[in-house]
């Protein structure tokens, strides 16, 4: 909705991924002055359309709209972003249908790299509903010992230095520096920040952190592609469930 340039890039990348995977995608590019009623009517139409298995509303949306109401309106079995409260609750208890795409992508990266989470000290920096909180839950389900840090955390550096696995998802450019990284730690950088000179950087100062880490994700090109891959996975899963229930 509207003309957010970052949203346009994300939507285009998702459309390309759908095309690559053989998934049909339908884009509804709505103007910034779309009313709440118009948006809710569209969601209701898509909820009832059997040819649609997954629905997502690209965030952020214009400030005059109620984001919470939009998320709640999407049918949980079509909620391929896994933002609906019903899906969030399932993640908490570990009995889920869909996982939020970014945390799921992080877990896939860790698993594919052969890194064992069980018993490890895991520090998640950021407490958003989209990344930080579900990320902590997934690490906990994998038997990690999890600490969540945020803007009110006292002595962030000392907490991060204890971590065997660091997940930075706070949206502050290069907040986590090399001197905060334990020797041999695994560092996952979810951040994507545009500097005044247009350079794209993460929440981790890559060069200094890479000298200490045993594994580290770059920005761009690390977690981002995994997020889109997990969206495709959620969509296929939704399609299979709908097919079985017909």
Image (cartoon, rainbow, N blue to C red):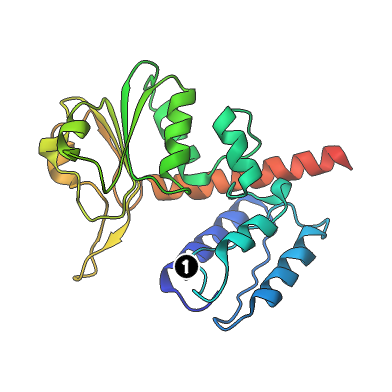
Q: Residue 206 occupies which quadrant of the picture?
A: top left
Is residue 45 left or right of 160 when viewed as pictured?
right
Q: Residue at x 64, y 79 (%)?
A: 35
Q: Residue at x 38, y 45 (%)?
A: 127
Is residue 24 left or right of 206 when viewed as pictured?
right
Q: Residue 212 occupies which quadrant of the picture?
A: top left
Point out the residue furthest to the top here: 119
Question: Could you tell me which quadrant the C terminus lies in?
Answer: top right
Near-viewer residue (228 or 47):
47
| Image x and y of residue 190, in percent | 35, 47
Q: Is residue 160 above or below residue 145?
A: below
Is residue 1 left or right of 199 when viewed as pictured?
right
Name the secondary structure under disc 1.
helix
Q: Residue at x 28, y 46 (%)?
A: 218
Total residue callouts:
1
Q: Residue 153 occupies which quadrant of the picture?
A: top left
Q: Disc 1 marks which residue?
A: 7
Mark 1 packing: few (<14 Cα in 10 Å), some, or many (20+)?
some
Q: Residue at x 60, y 38 (%)?
A: 89
| Image x and y of residue 241, in percent | 77, 39
Point out the residue furthest to the left here: 179
| Image x and y of residue 197, in percent | 19, 70
Question: Could you tell me which quadrant the N terminus lies in?
Answer: bottom right
| Image x and y of residue 226, in percent | 46, 44
Is residue 104 left or right of 240 when viewed as pictured?
left
Near-viewer residue (227 or 65):
65
């Amino acid at each position: 909705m509207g003309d957010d340039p970052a949203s346009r890039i994300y939507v285009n990348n998702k459309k390309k991924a759908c095309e690559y995977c053989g998934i049909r995608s339908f884009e509804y590019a709505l103007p910034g002055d779309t009313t709440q009623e118009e948006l809710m009517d569209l969601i209701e139409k898509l909820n009832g359309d059997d040819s649609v298995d997954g629905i997502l509303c690209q965030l952020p949306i214009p400030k005059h709209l109620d984001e919470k109401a939009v998320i709640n309106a999407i049918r949980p079995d079509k909620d391929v972003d896994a933002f609906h409260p019903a899906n969030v609750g399932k993640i908490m208890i570990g009995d889920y249908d869909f996982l939020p795409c970014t945390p799921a992508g992080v877990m896939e990266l860790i698993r594919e790299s052969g890194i064992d989470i069980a018993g490890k000290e895991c520090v998640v920096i950021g407490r958003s509903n989209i990344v930080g909180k579900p990320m902590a839950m997934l690490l906990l389900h994998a038997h990690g010992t999890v600490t969540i840090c945020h803007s009110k955390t006292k002595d962030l550096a000392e907490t991060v230095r204890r971590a065997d696995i660091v997940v930075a998802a706070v949206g502050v450019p290069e907040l986590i520096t090399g001197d905060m990284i334990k020797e041999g730690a695994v560092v996952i950088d979810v951040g994507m920040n545009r500097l005044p000179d247009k350079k794209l950087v993460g929440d981790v100062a890559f060069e200094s952190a890479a000298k200490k880490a045993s594994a580290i994700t770059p920005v761009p090109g690390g977690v981002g592609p995994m997020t889109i891959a997990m969206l495709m996975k959620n969509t296929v899963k939704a399609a299979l469930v709908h097919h079985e229930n017909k």
